[in-house]
Image (spheres, helix red, strand yellow):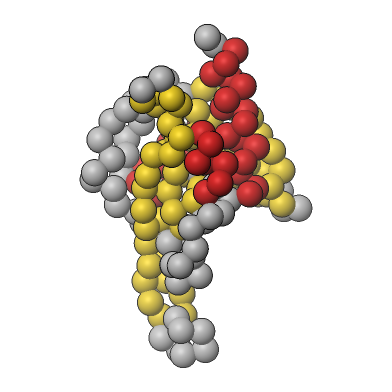
Amino acid sequence: MKKSAGILLYKKEKEQIMVLLAHFGGPYWENKNQGAWSVQKGIVETKEKVIDAAKREVQEETNLLINNSVTFLASRKVSKKKLAIMFYSYFDGDISNFKSNTFKIEWPKNSNQMKEFPEMDKLKWFTITEAYNYIHPSQKFFISKLEEKLIESK
């Protein structure tokens, strides 16, 4: 089973919890908004520590360095072949230098032309309520787990 790892970044703003989500890049997601946002995460490489993969994926997909402590949030099977392992961390840094790694696909389909797209094309802070509306449905579980953890720690 493949493993993916990521870090759900959050901050407090005017007594509200905000979470940082990234919008999927590429032509398929271009005109979609609800369900098209994600926690920064990706595949854990062979022999790579899960926490190291999570930090690497955040950096690759956002250009952000996470220096704060990172805590295990939860893990969940998100498909028949993939387990998502999520961490969380407080982050109140600057996101204006957002830049994502890229990927190439044939576009338009069957055109024999390869085009390059950013893996993530936008980065934005959402309230918890907004996040439930915009995050990919397979990741809503992690938003609820973050809510639980932050309520426990009060």
Please give the name of the residue rendered at 57% of the width and 41% of the height, measured from the top-left corner. 132
Is residue 98 among the parts visible in the rendering? Answer: yes
**Label total for image:** 0
* Residue 128, percent from left and from top: 51, 34
Of residues 116 and 33, which is closer to you in this image?
A: 33
**For this view, does 81 lie left or right of residue 52?**
right
Q: What is the x, y in percent for residue 148?
A: 62, 22
Q: Is residue 113 above or below residue 92?
A: below
Q: Is the residue 61 above or below the residue 48 in the image? A: below
- Splitting the image into 4 quarters, where does residue 90 fall? top left
Residue located 44% across and 54% down the image: 23
Q: Residue furthest top?
A: 154
- Of all residues, the one furthest to the bottom in this rendering is 111
Residue 106: % across, % down: 46, 80
Q: Residue at x 57, y 25 (%)?
A: 147
Q: Is residue 90 visible?
A: no
Q: Nearer the viewer, residue 125 or 24?
A: 125
